[in-house]
Image (spheres, rainbow, N blue to C red):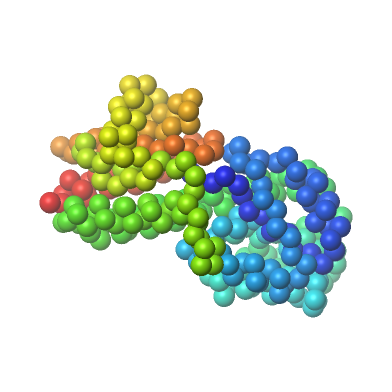
Amino acid sequence: MFQTEWEILIVDDEPDVFAVSRLALKNVKVYGVPLKLHYCASRTEAVDLISTKSDYAPALAVALIDVVMETDTAGLDLCRFIREERGNPFTQLFIRTGQPGTAPEREVIDRYEINGYFTKAEATEDKLYSMIKSGVRQYYWSILTKGVLFTMRNVTSALGSRPAIAAILQKLLDEAVHERSGEAVATYANVNFSYILENQVVASAGWSQSEALAARDRLDQQAGLPLSPSGKYVIDENKQLLVKVSPGQGIGHAYIVATLTFQVPEFIPAVLAEALASHATVWHASA
């Protein structure tokens, strides 16, 4: 929820391809967030660039990759590097080839876990638009759900100790609001995110405890939209988000309050609510 740009990689040994792509994608936004285009002229350059990205949450959303570059299979070797050597299932890979007979479509998709395949003759502005839009959406869904499941697993492992649960949530939240590139670490600007369980601010970034509680109280006054089975979410005019769940069985309300950097789709509050209900249940059962 903290993205300010989506990173897109174009790998092709013809610079004109990048120029045309950059023009076609100039004003494209996904969830209100602009694209940041990177260009590499070879597999070697792309490997160097990708190797600077975090292993835990790859920053690269979509890659458009030519097949024939320094070798006849350079693009396919790059796809294998991303999927197998880097262990990255998240980046959406699209093969764009000028020689389709060199790499048959079905074989490439099956063997290299490619998300899409098209010839350069098919690379119209509308085609690029639809691929980038759908690719970024799928990438973000994958990253979000992976992060939520990872957090739930870690919180559940600390069942019985509220200090341990709080420490885990704070650690993961701190990692989430930092972007790592090689050895450099940058903090996302204007990030606010807090977990509030049974009226206690358990973990927070950006806001102080009093600010988080004030944001919760202000947002909770609004009706918002319902979440199943028992909860709601609110997004106000300042892009501040409230997710509230009531797990029941004597468990107090649980909240996430945050400041958004982009227009979140409906699935985000729903996914966060499921995770929040799990956290609240584990918290309630712990001392």
The residue sitting at 31% across, 43% down in the picture is: 195
Left or right, 8 with respect to 271, comes to right
Among the 4 quarters of the image, the one containing residue 72: bottom right
Front-most of residues 225 and 9 = 9
The residue sitting at 27% across, 34% down in the picture is: 210
The answer to whether residue 195 of the structure is visible from this angle is: yes
Q: Quick check: 199 above or below 137?
A: above
Q: Quick check: 17 above or below 192?
A: below
Q: Name the residue furthest left.
A: 287
Among the 4 quarters of the image, the one containing residue 222: top left
Residue 85 rendering spot, x and y as whole percentages: 57, 75
How many numbered marks are there?
0
Front-most of residues 168 and 264 = 168
Q: Quick check: 276 above or below 214?
A: below
The residue sitting at 22% across, 40% down in the picture is: 200
The residue sitting at 30% across, 47% down in the picture is: 203
Residue 80 rendering spot, x and y as whole percentages: 64, 73
The answer to whether residue 149 of the structure is visible from this angle is: no
Front-most of residues 262 and 274 = 262
Residue 27 rendering spot, x and y as whole percentages: 73, 40
Residue 187 rendering spot, x and y as whole percentages: 47, 52
Front-most of residues 268 and 219 = 219
Left or right, 77 with respect to 41, comes to left
